[in-house]
Amino acid sequence: MRLRTLAAGTVGLGLGVAAYASLVERNWYRLRRVVVPVLPPGAAPLRVLHLSDLHMTPAQTRKQRWVSSLASLEPDLVIVTGDNMASVSAVPAVLRAFSPLFEFPGAFVFGSNDYFGPVLKNPLGYLRRDRKHIEGPPLPAHDLRAGLLSAGWLELNNARGVLKAGGRAIELAGVDDPHIGRDRYVSAALEPSADLHFGVTHSPEPRVLDPMVADGLDLIFAGHTHGGQVCVPFYGALTTNCELPRRMARGLHRYGESWLHVSAGLGTHPTAPVRFACPPEASILTLVSR
């Protein structure tokens, strides 16, 4: 009798955790505030909104409204690190969510889920580093790119550029998604006229981060990890789905001589719609004097 009661309690707890992870936490959007001591002494603060991994579908209207509401933060710059879509029909929803943010300077790179849609897979496969990437149906990346470019945002897929934000010139160097081997980072001397130098990538693979650090970039933005998506309290992420160490699955870290900010993102893969001990997030980074 006691054993049956214990078994029933265990099953009930498991069902409760699953319900919480799939119905509550994955929709519990949060704003993470981060301070980065990266500016020269005496410099005025600069505020950067970092968005990643929306994995948007047209029906996710609450997520769209929440992202739009972030315009009230009045950031100096918006950085988007990819995996915006989870449906072939998602472009209008993504652009609608971003629309109020187009008032501010912005830059973006793409992730694999801007090029290919979701496919059904075993969620436990994420724990295997040697698993093969399976391409889903093509997504309209060209339409999303056109919408972001028409809003005046800077594309950084294997590209560099300089934009003005917060009264400063910022050089940005980015790559297309390393997770699917589309990255082509070329080391180059820093732009001497720029006040700050940022790196932007979807997946924070060390093979991309290392040359960015060697080039002297001040701050690198990445996503992809979902913060682990399912974390164990007092242990953390089970995986980063890349070669980055688990302890760096989300948040701000020193990476060599640079700062690295990894966003836990706002979405989930549609075939694994759960989050546990890792709520979806956007981040506002306030850059201050060293």
Image: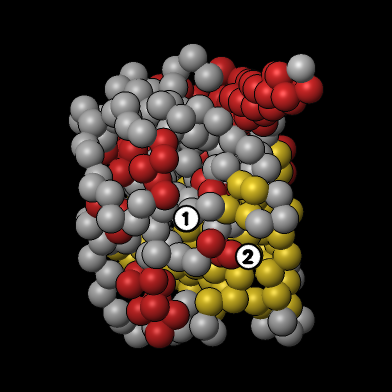
Identify the mark at residue 240; answer none if there is no mark. 1
Question: Can residue 126 be seen here?
Answer: yes
Residue 252 bears which disc, if any?
2
The percent position of residue 67, horizontal first and vertical second, equals 60, 33
Kindly identify the residue that appears in the image at 63 percent across and 38 percent down. 276
Q: Does the image show residue 176?
A: no
Give the vertical position of 133 relative to 144 (above or below). below
Residue located 27% across and 70% down the image:
185
The three-letter amino acid code for the residue at tag 1 is Thr
Q: Is residue 147 above or below residue 132?
A: above
For the residue marked with disc 2, what is the amino acid? Leu
- In the image, taking residue 6 as reference, residue 202 lies left or right, namely left
* SS for callout 2: strand
Percent of width and height locating residue 183: 26, 61
User: Taking 46 as reference, is 221 left or right?
Assistant: left
- Identity of the residue furthest to the top in this view: 59
Q: Quick check: 172 left or right of 36?
A: left
The foreground one among 225 and 1 is: 1
**In the image, residue 200 lies at what x, y percent?**
43, 61
Colour scheme: secondary structure
Residue 282 - label: none
Q: Quadrant for the N terminus, please.
A: top right
Splitting the image into 4 quarters, where does residue 152 fall? top left
The residue lying furthest to the front in this view is 1
State if disc 2 and disc 1 touch (CB < 8 Å).
Answer: no
Of residues 70 and 277, the one drawn nearer to the viewer in this rendering:
277
Check disc 1: other Cα within 10 Å, few if <14, some if 14-19, many if 20+: many
Front: mark 1 or 2: 1
Q: What's the CA distance linking mark 1 and mark 2?
A: 15 Å
| Side of 117 where 59 appears, left or right | right
In the depicted structure, whether residue 265 falls above or below residue 69? below
- The image position of residue 144, as x and y in percent, is 33, 34
